[in-house]
Image (cartoon, rainbow, N blue to C red):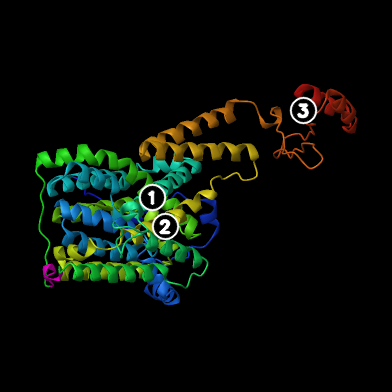
């Protein structure tokens, strides 16, 4: 019997790293992120970014985390202690492994359905375990490479733009929770005055990257929450001490209900936004850095295959969270170390009793932070094509981007937005491959000051000048004399 030959460490590393979706920009620049085993290089990079802005950026994603965490905990679907502890642990490990502020955020689709159907802890765990197992398999088997091979850039950028609009909508919904300027219904700590003030503050310091605006807003929100807790005499319900996690094992019925009801809808969202779009955004924000899709899918799978068994809500990465943390100042893993340590400490010391204080945190602050973080995600969609010099291709790519974003927002589903964008991209690909060439399509340039349309054709096409069709025929006849040669006159006759 022949012995079984196990792969070497070099072979395993080559297998895992051979799936990179490398853009031309990333390939031409050196990687600015030292590897995780380069402790000296990592320490120097963190020391260079040791500012208040770095710690402020750690809080850039709480607009998504806090509302979902509070809602699932109040309903009894998730454990606050487990969610804080494992969320903090994954923050620290993710920062160490990737070296960038790769966020750890809730699986929003699962959370929404869990809140609607009032999931038990077992059903929530079943949804997270099912999705994570599939994502882990697709990543480790490298089948996800097919997505990166055939998905065009405008579709990815459209997913990011659509996610931007959806998160903006959620941020506005949080602001509208206590939408009052005056009257009996106004709450002194959470109203439109505070929402407008924090929004203007973020805009004023947008170009001043050294101002830790997220940290300032968060501290003010904590002060307001503590003041409201004291005014309602609820501090006696907060119990500091040692709080521990508990094991949650879903039954077969809970697993089936959770996965079929919430897991299937989360799967395309995780694959597209938490993996594909996240990798693209990482390359845009950190030129030269090219994360492995296998590493991202593996970390998502491990996070939930461990945490969901202890009552934690399902976690994933996400392009929106990375954009939010980057917008508010995070540039290195130092922000994740800070956020992870705070989460773990609060979860162990206060546990479920912290919910008494968290529910008084002003939703106006959370909404503004989520809204502005979404804008940062939408900004990356401005580089939506790989052919900026080809006007026809650029126009087609922009249409694909708009179709993807509009379908995602209209249907509120990443999968349907992805399918619509892919269909539009396929149609344009067929037209480019089997349709008329650029030389056979006359293109009218914008009107100039003298009323003529000047055309700058794409590279390789023939240049013609076409007079404005709104002029009288006599004007066409007189002005056509300006065009030299029979070829130019033939072009005019063919276009009139």
The numbered mark, 1 or 3, whose residue comes first in the sequence reads: 1
Find out whether the residues at labels 1 and 2 contact each other: C-beta distance under 8 Å. yes
Q: Residues within 10 Å of mark 2 (few under 14, many from 20)?
A: many
Tell me the quadrant of the picture where the N terminus can be found: top left
Residue at 22% from the left image edge and 57% from the top image edge: 70
Measured from the top left, where is residue 226 in percent x and y?
Answer: 23, 70
The numbered mark, 2 or 3, whose residue comes first in the sequence reads: 2
Mark count: 3
According to the picture, the residue beneath numbered tag 3 turns out to be 469
Q: Is residue 495 above or below residue 108?
A: above
Q: Which residues are magenta?
A: 235-240
Measured from the top left, where is residue 494 in percent x and y?
Answer: 77, 22
According to the picture, the residue beneath numbered tag 1 turns out to be 167
**Left-right relation of 101 to 22:** left
Q: Quadrant of residue 64?
A: bottom left
**Spatial separation of the CA atoms under disc 2 and disc 3:** 47 Å
């Amino acid at each position: 019997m022949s012995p079984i030959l196990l792969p070497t460490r070099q072979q395993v590393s080559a297998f895992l790293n051979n799936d990179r979706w490398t853009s031309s920009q990333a390939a031409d620049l050196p990687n600015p992120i030292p590897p995780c085993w380069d402790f000296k290089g990592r320490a120097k990079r963190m020391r260079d970014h040791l500012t208040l802005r770095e710690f402020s950026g750690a809080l850039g994603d709480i607009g998504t985390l806090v509302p979902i965490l509070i809602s699932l905990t109040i309903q009894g679907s998730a454990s606050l202690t487990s969610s804080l502890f494992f969320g903090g642990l994954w923050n620290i490990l993710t920062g160490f492994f990737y070296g960038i502020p790769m966020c750890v955020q809730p699986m929003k689709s699962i959370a929404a359905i869990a809140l609607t159907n009032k999931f038990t802890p077992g059903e929530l765990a079943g949804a997270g375990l099912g999705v994570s197992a599939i994502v882990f398999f697709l990543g480790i088997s490298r089948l996800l490479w097919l997505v990166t091979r055939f998905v065009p850039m405008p579709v990815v950028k459209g997913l990011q733009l659509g996610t931007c609009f959806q998160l903006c909508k959620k941020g506005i919904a949080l602001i509208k929770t206590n939408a009052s300027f005056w009257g009996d219904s106004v709450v002194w700590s959470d109203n439109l005055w505070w929402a407008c003030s924090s929004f203007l503050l973020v805009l004023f310091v947008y170009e001043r990257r050294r101002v830790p605006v997220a940290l300032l807003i968060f501290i003010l929100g904590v002060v307001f929450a503590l003041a409201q807790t004291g005014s309602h005499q609820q501090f006696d319900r907060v119990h500091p001490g040692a709080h521990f996690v508990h094991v949650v094992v879903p039954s077969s019925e809970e697993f089936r209900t959770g996965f079929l009801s919430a897991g299937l809808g989360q799967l395309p969202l995780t694959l597209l936004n938490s993996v594909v779009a996240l990798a693209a955004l990482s390359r845009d924000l950190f030129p030269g850095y090219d994360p492995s899709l296998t590493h991202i899918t593996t970390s998502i799978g491990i996070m939930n295959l461990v945490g969901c068994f202890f009552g934690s809500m399902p976690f994933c990465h996400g392009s929106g969270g990375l954009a939010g943390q980057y917008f508010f100042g995070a540039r290195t893993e130092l922000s994740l170390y800070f956020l992870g340590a705070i989460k773990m400490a609060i979860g162990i010391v206060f546990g479920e009793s912290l919910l008494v204080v968290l529910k008084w945190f002003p939703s106006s602050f959370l909404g503004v932070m989520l809204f502005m973080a979404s804008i940062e995600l939408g900004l990356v969609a401005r580089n939506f094509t790989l052919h900026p010099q080809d006007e026809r291709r650029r126009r087609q790519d922009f249409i694909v981007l708009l179709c993807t974003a509009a379908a995602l927002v209209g249907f509120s589903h990443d999968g349907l937005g992805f399918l619509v964008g892919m269909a539009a991209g396929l149609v344009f690909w067929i037209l480019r491959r089997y349709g008329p060439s650029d030389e056979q399509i006359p293109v009218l340039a914008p009107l100039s000051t003298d009323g003529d349309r000047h055309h700058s054709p794409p590279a390789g096409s023939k240049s013609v000048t076409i007079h404005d069709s709104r002029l009288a025929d006599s004007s066409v006849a007189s002005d056509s004399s300006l065009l030299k040669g029979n070829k130019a006159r033939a072009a005019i006759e063919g276009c009139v």
